[in-house]
Image (tube, rainbow, N blue to C red):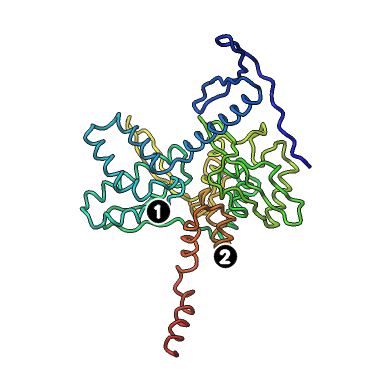
Amino acid sequence: MAKKKPEVPQYGTVVLKGIQYYRTRIMDADGKQVSLYATTCEELYEKQLEARRQVEEIIFHRQHPTVAEYCEKWLLMQSAKVSSSTLRGYTADMKNYIIKPLGEMYMEEVTADDIRLALVPLSKKSEGLYNKVNMLLKCVFYSAERSQILEYNPCEGISGKGGRPSKKREALTDQQVEVLLDTVKGLPPYLFIMLGLYSGLRREEILALQWDCVFLDEPTPYISVRRAWRTEHNRPVISTVLKTKAAKRDIPIPQCLVDCLREAKEKSISEYVIADSEGQPLAASQFQRVWQYVVVRSTKPRNYYKYVNGQSIKYTVTPTLGMTQKNQPKIKYTLDFDVTPHQLRHTYITNLLYAGVDPKTVQYLAGHENSKTTMDIYAKVKYNKPEELFGVVNGAFHQAVGS
């Protein structure tokens, strides 16, 4: 059966210098209207499609910059704050010690291990240079985190030269998963958390997921990743431009997620799996409010401020596990561990590896374009426990002795 050609729209016309042109307008990447002209409708339609594709690519790169691109932007922002000599120093150090080892990576791909490896050559140089580059790395990544380019900050806890190593963010244990799901059952973040834990989708993939990509009645139920979510001035934008080519994938889903999605679909009034009260995709601030249902139920210390004699006094409150919130008795502190949206995906990947799924399959399911990302997690899961390695090492050397 021949593929039906798309219907070419009818465009308005304009005469320029005695020649009739067809004309249309589109929004560019900065939200401004620009005009396109052509002598035929067909030619103008092709121009319009190509222009839209270019706009989507520009917007995608703004939301998913490489380290080199974001460093350039950060330096531009600093140019109004620091002296020209300081800026020259920043620029030289970034070029030599940050952009050179990390520049081609997407900001959101960079892990704490990547940053530590970038700092290794500096360990043989002066402490002052090491700490300066360390500071620049933290400034760049904290800035990206505040701009919501990153789901988590890989610089958290990276110490200065000679400092103690930071605590790495681990996958959730089975017990923690059970407690988390019990805590949010019936609350707004429940479906998001189930999708993260049992499909491994990225946040932008979950928030862009539509029901036309959820196949619950197939012999093997699955989710098809075809769209990505981002925000512009807090407004949601759904695009078919994914993070990488590898992000486009079909993910089989377990029965627990099938049942959860089926129940959600019956109640849904939207084409989006996760939507606001009007059926629209969530804005950035709306997602933050949804995630607060998790945050407010954790025993993580909170900092508060109160005014005493006209001065702002900071004080810290650490909730007790099992207690209820003083002003809202319905909120109970049940989470004595940290959890972030990214941890859900990390837990999914880790559980696949624990179950013996080969790394190449995990790479596909996770949508990792670079196998290094998968193998780093694989190495950590498989080789970080001496008791699990005893048999392997003992067997290897026993064979050597016996030969």
The residue depicted at 59 percent of the width and 44 percent of the height is 205
Q: Can you tell which mark lies on residue 188?
A: none
CB atoms of marks 1 and 2 within 8 Å: no
- Residue sticking out furthest to the bottom: 402
Q: What amino acid is labelled 2 in the image?
A: Asp
The answer to whether residue 72 is left or right of residue 8 is left
The residue depicted at 55 percent of the width and 9 percent of the height is 17
The picture places residue 80, in percent across and down from the top left corner, at: 30, 29
Q: Residues within 10 Å of mark 2 (few under 14, many from 20)?
A: few
The quadrant of the picture occupied by the C terminus is: bottom left
Of 105 and 333, nearer the camera is 105
Q: What amino acid is labelled 1 in the image?
A: Ala
Of 242 and 257, nearer the camera is 242
- Residue sticking out furthest to the front: 18
The residue at which mark 1 appears reads as 112
The answer to whether residue 390 is left or right of residue 272 is left
The residue depicted at 70 percent of the width and 48 percent of the height is 261
The answer to whether residue 184 is left or right of residue 5 is left
The picture places residue 265, in percent across and down from the top left corner, at: 73, 43
* 80 is higher (above) or lower (below) than 355: above
Q: Can you tell which mark lies on residue 358?
A: 2
The residue depicted at 29 percent of the width and 31 percent of the height is 81
